[in-house]
């Protein structure tokens, strides 16, 4: 008998999560919680029915009907690595079972087995795939069928595939779990009806919700190593200039300073409005060339000024492609300036920044147009610039 379509889909989905887990798992610097845990869960089973035997058998053809039933499970597990948990688990159901329409009897159904839970991104996307196998018993609850005595405690095998969601409730690590499992159940009919009867096969669907309770204290983040005691010349404000030479002590950290330890007064970048390019290209438009001619006049009027050329794009396209496009565009501007009389020694560098440092939203056409820009950043002030 072949597995039905739901099992195939669940197995494929669970295996997909398993193989993608290693690729997407991330290390956010927090020690992984590898404590053992217990996971008690309440379950509801949507149980399948089957038919065994034929009219020549002692019992005749038997239609086995299993009613849906409430049950429960208990797992003991441990995280193995960032994407895998292994669990020992057991479950129990007590569905009503009827044969050929006769009055229903309680049918004990239980099993014990091993689960593997696969997490594609445990800390950021708490969805996991499930693959499991278990072995157990099914007691049909009947002493006789059509006047013939029957056995009990038939051997049963269970194969599980499914998906689950896990939500952390507190810092201790207590979690809520919710799961769906497709369970393919095989019951050995010979244990109940005698030799010669084919196995009963069921395609069951199980939904469960419960808790995952870790055992022991949660892991602690490693404590940072204290910095070594300072030796040699002191730099109290951390600006790179020792105290003995620092004429501006107490400079805020991160401030760029000169050799005296004093903040460098920077000129704001000059946005070259109107310097645009043909679509998806580094070729200057005629409007851009006219604008750059004005820039050249201004640079010639301030010959002591050195500068860097920076370029930016909007966020359409990949980050890598945009970075390359912005670099080609600033190189095109540099070529135009040097080809029209600006000494290359005045250009201290070019830098394409791609889609970084947007000055407006990339959600609108107007915002994207503002983000596509070329800037001049003065690196040596010299005389003040005018006309740009």
Image (cartoon, grey):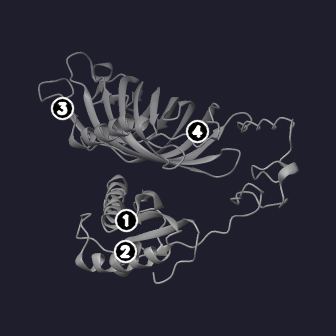
Vertically, is 282 above or below 211? Answer: below
Q: Is mark 3 on a helix, strand or loop?
A: loop
Pair 4/1: label in front: 1
Distance CA(mark 1)–CA(mark 3) = 50 Å
Q: Looking at the image, which is closer to me, 232 or 342?
A: 342
Residue corresponding to mark 3: 2
Residue corresponding to mark 2: 368
Percent x, y of residue 354: 40, 60
Residue corresponding to mark 1: 315
Percent x, y of residue 22: 43, 34
Please tell me which residue is depicted at 47% across the width and 69% down the height of the picture: 376
Task: Give the class, few, some or many, for how many residues have Cα within 10 Å of label 3's Cα (few <14, many ≥20).
Answer: few
Distance CA(mark 4)–CA(mark 1) = 45 Å
Distance CA(mark 3)–CA(mark 4) = 32 Å
Q: Looking at the image, which is closer to me, 134 or 334?
A: 334
* Disc ID at residue 264: none
Task: Give the class, few, some or many, for how many residues have Cα within 10 Å of label 1's Cα (few <14, many ≥20).
Answer: some
Vertically, is 284 above or below 247? Answer: below
């Amino acid at each position: 008998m072949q597995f039905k379509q739901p099992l195939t889909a669940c197995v494929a989905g669970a295996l997909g999560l398993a193989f993608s887990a290693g690729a997407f798992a991330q290390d956010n610097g927090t020690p992984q919680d590898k404590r053992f845990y217990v996971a008690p869960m309440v379950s509801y089973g949507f149980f399948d029915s089957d038919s065994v035997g034929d009219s020549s058998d002692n019992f005749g053809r038997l239609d086995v009907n299993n009613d849906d039933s409430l049950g429960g499970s208990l797992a003991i597990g441990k995280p193995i690595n960032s994407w895998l948990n292994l669990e020992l688990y057991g479950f129990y159901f007590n569905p009503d079972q009827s044969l050929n329409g006769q009055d229903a009897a309680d049918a004990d159904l239980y099993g014990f087995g091993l689960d593997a839970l696969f997490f594609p991104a445990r800390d950021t996307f708490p969805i996991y795939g499930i693959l499991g196998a278990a072995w157990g018993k099914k007691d049909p609850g009947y002493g006789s069928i059509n006047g013939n005595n029957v056995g009990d405690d038939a051997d049963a095998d269970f194969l599980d595939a499914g998906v689950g969601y896990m939500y952390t409730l507190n810092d201790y690590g207590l979690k809520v779990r919710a799961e769906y499992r497709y369970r393919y159940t095989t019951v050995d009919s010979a244990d109940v009806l005698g030799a010669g009867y084919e196995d009963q096969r069921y395609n069951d669907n199980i939904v469960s919700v419960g808790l995952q309770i870790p055992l022991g204290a949660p892991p602690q983040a490693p404590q940072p190593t204290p910095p070594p005691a300072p030796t040699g010349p002191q730099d109290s404000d951390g600006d790179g200039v020792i105290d003995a030479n620092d004429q501006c002590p107490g400079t805020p950290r991160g401030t760029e300073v000169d050799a005296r330890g004093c903040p460098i007064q920077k000129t704001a970048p000059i946005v070259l409005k109107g310097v645009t390019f043909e679509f998806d290209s580094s070729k200057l438009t005629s409007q851009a060339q006219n604008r750059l001619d004005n820039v050249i006049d201004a640079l010639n009027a301030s010959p002591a000024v050195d500068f860097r050329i920076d370029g930016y794009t909007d966020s359409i396209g990949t980050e890598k492609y945009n970075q390359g496009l912005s670099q080609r565009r600033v190189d095109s501007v540099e070529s135009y300036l040097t080809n029209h009389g600006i000494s290359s020694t005045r250009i201290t560098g070019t830098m394409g920044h791609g889609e970084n440092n947007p000055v407006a939203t990339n959600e609108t056409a107007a915002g994207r147009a503002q983000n596509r820009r070329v800037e001049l950043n003065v690196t040596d002030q010299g005389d003040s610039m005018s006309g740009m």
